[in-house]
Amino acid sequence: MQGDWVDHSTTVTMFGSKTSSSDHKGTVRRRAERDIVAFGIAIAAILMFVGTGGSVLPKIMRSWLYNENGPDYLLVNALLLNIALILFGLRRYRELMAEIEDRREAEELAKQLAETDPLTGCLNRRSIAPATDALIAEHRDGHGAVAFLMIDLDNFKQVNDLYGHKVGDQLLKATAQRMRDALPPHGLLSRLGGDEFACVVPYDARTPDRVDQIADELIDRISRPHNFDNVPIETTISVGIATTCRIGGDADSDRSLGEKLLHRADIAMYNAKKQGKNRYSWFEATMETELRFRSEMESGIRLGIQNGEFVPYYEQQIDIESGEIVGFEMLARWHSPDHGVVNPNIFIPIAEELGLISAMSEQLIGIALEDAKEWANDLTLSVNISPVQMRDPWFAQKLLKLLVEHNFPPHRLEIEITESCLHENIGQVRSMITSLKNQGVRISLDDFGTGYSSLAQLRSLPFDRLKIDRSFVGELNAEDANEKLINAIIALGDGLDLPITAEGIEDGKILQALRGKGAMKGQGYLYGRPEEALAVRDRLAALGLLKGENETSQTGDTTEAGDLPGQRQA
Ligand code: C2E
Ligand code: MG
Ligand code: MG
């Protein structure tokens, strides 16, 4: 069996030394034989004592009391030997009893060690599923049901990293005790490993609210502050709940009910974390489907980066007054062998969580720089940068290195960051933006209006452009178009001296409305959907906006053949 790594030819003794199992069996057999011989000798000795003692002892008594002739010396010796043998048998019997007691205690200890977690004294991961099965069997009749609550501390790693393992252990022990205190009679408590616990509770299926109450109580008790060696610690938990009530006779039959509950509660716990932690969540079948999809995505993304399945698409950016193409925004797409063309809204957040966004983004930017080198020199390339990348203190250096490697003029590159980048470590973001700007790279604030950047931040950060989110631009399409908000954003841009790009221009009506509001760039489905490099190349070739053969020099020269306004209408 795969994964069955236990070496059956050896066993570990209680004291940790290894003996081979054949040696061990031999010793046990010899000891048993010796015990049988000792037992036989003792029985024979007792029989002989009864036989010899019956005639010899009265004779000895009579010789002492009445001075009669004593018994035969041979018989006396035989009797003494008999007594010695009986004493020997008795001693052996006592030794045997002590040995049996020692063995029983050792077995009990071994069983306890195998079933419990030494730190908290709770059941361990191995024993919780069988114990749950036993509890389910006990409460099967009538309205009996069993709920499995999977519990995970939300910030345990932080506590361990900040205060060390001693405090971490204290927190685990105290948490286990608080759970024990909240556990109803007959409930089971287990530490599954690390900071993961499980409570298994029987309840009446007609009152499932009881389980909600227990979950609430656990959350409440565990969130109360601790104090370990004058270190104040607070923690919260995320709880996933699964119940026997909702498990039908499904196909997954090689798992016991206990194992199924554990699996489902784990999925529900993951969902509680995703919903924001410090809460509980009941298992639902859709969660399992989502999780499966998610894990497929995760492995697909890892492989996809290795296999170069992430490709840049480009969306035109237009001067809305003249209708000329002024540049392209690179938008990532995943050409997944299993899922077809996948949009970034699906894979970017996963790549961010997996810590793969930088690798993916650098790969895409590298390709985009090569593609854009073929375009006319005054066409810009915009790339989106994730907040995760902005947390990397080396981000600016990495980007500048890419520009050098691909020999791409920095002034043609624009990076788009969203307002969420500004919430964390504004000082680091400012110095990064400043060093990129010093090299000539331009910076836009993307999806403007959807986040919470303050006016003070907007003024203090050296942005080059505001991109109005398409949700505001889309408003212009409505019957009773509410233009107040978009007018306010445009006025804000004017006041801060920041040029504007309007995203999401889907039709002529929106374009018309925007045209009266001053100079700005625009992009949207009206001008075309994002397309691959080859299609962009054809489009630009038709407009005479590709670099001439003799101009593929990497100088960043801005004079272009065919760079006339009339020729570059989108
Ligand atoms: P974004 O930067 O705001 O990009 C604009 C999104 O709006 C694109 O979606 C684009 O296809 C879509 N769009 C453009 N015009 C219209 C229109 O007229 N109507 C409507 N309804 N939508 C329009 P897409 O390509 O799905 O990208 C979504 C988001 O994913 C982007 O929003 C950007 O934040 C992110 N993203 C894309 N590529 C990358 C990347 O390489 N790195 C990072 N970090 N994020 C990326
Ligand atoms: Mg963008
Ligand atoms: Mg945007």
Image: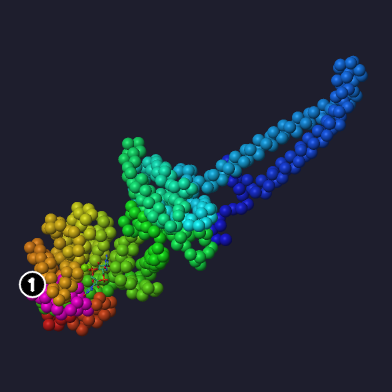
| Residue located 49% across and 66% down the image | 250
Image color mode: rainbow
Q: Position of residue 544 (x, y in %)?
A: 18, 82
Q: Residue at x 40, y 53 (%)?
A: 210
| Nearer-the-camera pick, 277 or 207 | 207
In the rendered view, tell whether residue 293 sits above or below residue 120: below
Specify start and end residues of the magenta stretch as a single range. Answer: 502-528
Q: Quadrant of residue 303?
A: bottom left
Q: Quadrant of residue 167?
A: top left
Residues packed near mark 1 inside 10 Å, few (<14), some (14 to 19) or many (20 plus): few
* Residue 318 rendering spot, x and y as whole percentages: 16, 75
Q: Does mark 1's beta carbon lie closer than 8 Å to ligand 3?
A: no
Magenta stretch contains residue 514: yes
Question: Is the N terminus in the top left, top right, bottom left or bottom right quadrant?
Answer: bottom right
- Position of 328 relative to 65 (above/below): below
226 lies left or right of 509 = right
Residue 461: which quarter of the image? bottom left
Residue 251: percent from left, percent from top: 51, 67
Q: Is residue 477 magenta?
A: no
Q: Nearer the viewer, residue 227 or 182?
A: 182
At x 36% / y 51%, what residue is drawn?
Answer: 216
Give the amino acid at mark 1.
Answer: Gly
Front residue of 80/495: it is: 80
Q: State which image quarter holds ligand 1.
A: bottom left
Residue that mark 1 sits on: 518
